[in-house]
Image (cartoon, helix red, strand yellow):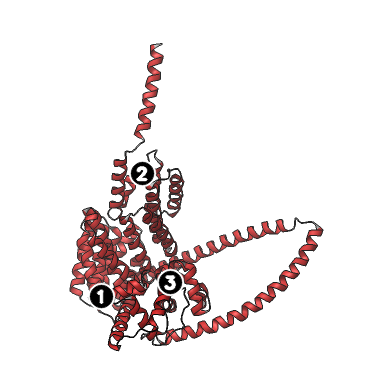
């Protein structure tokens, strides 16, 4: 009997111990969180280890975070299938977490990692949607640290789609906010934020220069922020090496070959010390490219052949590998060595063709799958439709006849409306194209908006108001200065805000805008926003891929409905129609 009792007690104790071992304390959970985040930019494999350790917990909160972190990490390692599976699991566990502040914060984390994952896949629209959702949850609990992360990531989306000015504006605001609230962060958090913001700002300035190569000062700004990124990235090896590579590229663009050479050698050494194979290949390619550019062909051969051999060993046949073989072929052709020139030319062309063929095959497969799915849906629809009896069928015939008549009528009306809208839209496009190189002096058609009660009252007060011309000119000058800084893209660009900004009162400001621009302040503000969107759509093909909600938020509209209404008033068509018809 004692033996049986002892055995039962042993089972109970063993079961309790097993359950306890699968639980993490809150402190252990937070420590693992920090370790996962800090290793993302240093050592992905270490982050995976910490995430898997967290995934052994029985707590759904811990499991939700572990799975969403693994989702991003799997995408970094190139396993998109597993990444998507982990992301779905994260939300399954999230549903099991009781409603609380912790759950709201955790939801924002999930959307942030979701955005990062879509960003890595090149799905910038989906990334932005995730960030926008996450911001809402962070604002609900006043999580300033997480809001800053979302703002940085949203700025990166703006940069990716070519909206460099807005990205720069957002990132500089974020940088100033971080500096003003330095005490709110730990030392590691502060350095991590400053590292990421500086790297992003530098990238935005460099990309903006590529679009406007006459503005050499943009390269100086890029250089300044890459150096700051290196300073703040002492504990973040991934950011540090990317900043160094980019700084070398800035020197190369400036034809400062000596500093470019030194920087690339530094990157090569740093990459070898930290086992960054891809970055090591990049450093060697950049050195080969630099020596080719300054006609030191023997040195160029050394580094380009190194890229070729390392890529073959590691199977990292990326863009650097292709370009290295291209330059090798050119050098051997110049050296009158046709056999070697042919060898490297063939490697370049074969790999280029394989890459393009794979892309075409993927596109065919996707289109095939979409077609099969649509066909299945149509077949089911047809089967359901013909289950009706004869009498219902006759009734449907009559209904279809009437429906066709109605559709024809609507189509004719729609075609007429579209023709009018297209004429208006084409006139706008020509107008904006003609004024791309200078600030448009043509007054655009006012965009009707619902005026605030305060502004209506101000209009009444303005009837008998009179101020001297010098003061009016000063107010207009300050307004134009705000326009040049794109201040009107902010959601808080309101009459009281602008009046305070230019050190006048709302009555004077409303009066001057009415007198000089012939419209209310609300109409003036909306017109600037809509004109900015039209200009970006015409000049920036990536901007047209934004969703209506994303475009609305990028220019400070509170919602997509009011933006779309104002846009249609200005152009005669919806934002999507305008983008599709450019």
How crowded pointer 3 is (Cα within 10 Å; few <14, some 14-19, many 20+) is rated as few
- Of circles 3 and 2, which is in front? 3
Q: Give me the residue at 57% from left, 61% from top.
A: 370
Q: Quadrant of residue 327?
A: bottom left
Residue 60 appears anywhere in the view = yes
**Residue at which label 2 appears:** 52
Quick one: label 3 or label 2, which is nearer the N terminus? Answer: 2
Q: Is residue 486 above or below residue 272?
A: below
Q: Give me the residue at 75% from left, 55% from top.
A: 387
Pick the front one: 184 or 428:
184
Secondary element at image label 3: helix
How crowded pointer 2 is (Cα within 10 Å; few <14, some 14-19, many 20+) is rated as some
How far apart are the two marked residues, 3 and 1, measured between alpha carbons?
A: 47 Å
In the picture provided, is 179 more to the left or to the right than 54? left
**Residue at which label 1 appears:** 219
Quick one: label 2 or label 1, which is nearer the N terminus? Answer: 2
């Amino acid at each position: 009997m004692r033996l049986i009792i002892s055995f039962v007690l042993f089972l109970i104790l063993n079961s309790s111990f097993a359950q306890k071992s699968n639980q993490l304390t809150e402190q252990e959970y937070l420590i693992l969180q920090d370790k996962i985040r800090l290793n993302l930019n240093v050592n992905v494999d270490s982050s995976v280890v910490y995430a898997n350790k967290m995934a052994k917990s029985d707590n759904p909160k811990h499991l939700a975070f572990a799975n969403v972190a693994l989702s991003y990490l799997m995408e970094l390692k190139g396993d998109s299938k597993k990444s998507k599976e982990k992301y779905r699991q994260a939300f399954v566990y999230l549903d099991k977490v009781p409603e609380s502040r912790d759950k709201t914060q955790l939801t924002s984390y999930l959307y942030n990692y979701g955005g990062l994952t879509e960003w890595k896949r090149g799905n910038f629209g989906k990334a932005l949607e995730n960030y926008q959702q996450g911001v809402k949850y962070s604002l609900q609990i006043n999580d300033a640290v997480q809001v800053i992360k979302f703002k940085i990531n949203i700025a990166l989306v703006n940069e990716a789609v070519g909206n460099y000015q807005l990205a720069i504006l957002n990132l500089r605001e974020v940088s100033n906010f971080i500096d003003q609230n330095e005490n709110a962060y730990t030392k590691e958090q502060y350095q991590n934020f400053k590292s990421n913001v500086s790297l992003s700002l530098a990238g935005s300035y460099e990309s903006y220069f590529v679009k406007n190569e006459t503005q050499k000062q943009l390269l100086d700004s890029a250089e300044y922020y890459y150096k700051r990124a290196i300073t703040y990235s002492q504990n973040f090896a991934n950011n540090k090496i990317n900043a160094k590579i980019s700084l070398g590229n800035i020197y190369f663009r400036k034809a400062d070959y000596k500093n470019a050479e030194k920087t690339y050698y530094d990157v090569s050494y740093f990459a070898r010390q930290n086992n960054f194979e891809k970055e090591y290949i990049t450093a060697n390619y950049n050195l080969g490219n630099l020596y080719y550019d300054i006609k030191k062909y023997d040195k160029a051969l050394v580094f380009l052949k190194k890229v070729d051999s390392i890529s073959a060993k590691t199977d990292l046949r990326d863009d650097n590998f292709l370009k290295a073989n291209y330059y090798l072929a050119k050098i051997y052709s110049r050296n009158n060595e046709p056999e070697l020139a042919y060898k490297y030319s063939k490697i370049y062309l074969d790999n280029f063709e394989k890459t393009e063929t794979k892309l075409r095959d993927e596109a065919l497969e996707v289109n095939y799958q979409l077609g099969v799915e649509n066909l299945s849906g149509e077949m089911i629809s047809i089967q359901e439709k013909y289950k009706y009896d004869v009498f219902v069928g006759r009734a449907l015939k009559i209904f279809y006849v009437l429906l066709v008549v109605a559709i024809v009528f609507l189509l004719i009306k729609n075609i007429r409306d579209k023709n009018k809208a297209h004429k208006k839209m084409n006139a706008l496009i020509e107008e904006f194209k003609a004024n791309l190189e200078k600030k448009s002096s043509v007054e655009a058609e006012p965009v009707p908006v619902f005026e605030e009660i305060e502004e209506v009252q101000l209009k009444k007060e303005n009837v008998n108001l009179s101020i001297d011309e010098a003061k009016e000119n000063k107010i207009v000058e300050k307004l134009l200065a705000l326009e040049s800084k794109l201040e009107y893209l902010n959601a808080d660009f309101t009459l009281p805000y602008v009046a305070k900004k230019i050190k006048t009162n709302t009555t004077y400001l409303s009066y001057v805008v009415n007198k000089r621009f012939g419209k209310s302040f609300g109409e003036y503000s909306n017109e600037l926003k809509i004109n900015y969107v039209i200009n970006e759509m015409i000049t920036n093909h990536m901007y047209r891929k934004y969703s209506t909600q994303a475009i609305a938020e990028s220019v400070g509209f509170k919602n997509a409905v009011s933006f779309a209404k104002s846009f249609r008033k200005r152009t005669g068509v919806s934002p999507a129609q305008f983008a599709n018809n450019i």
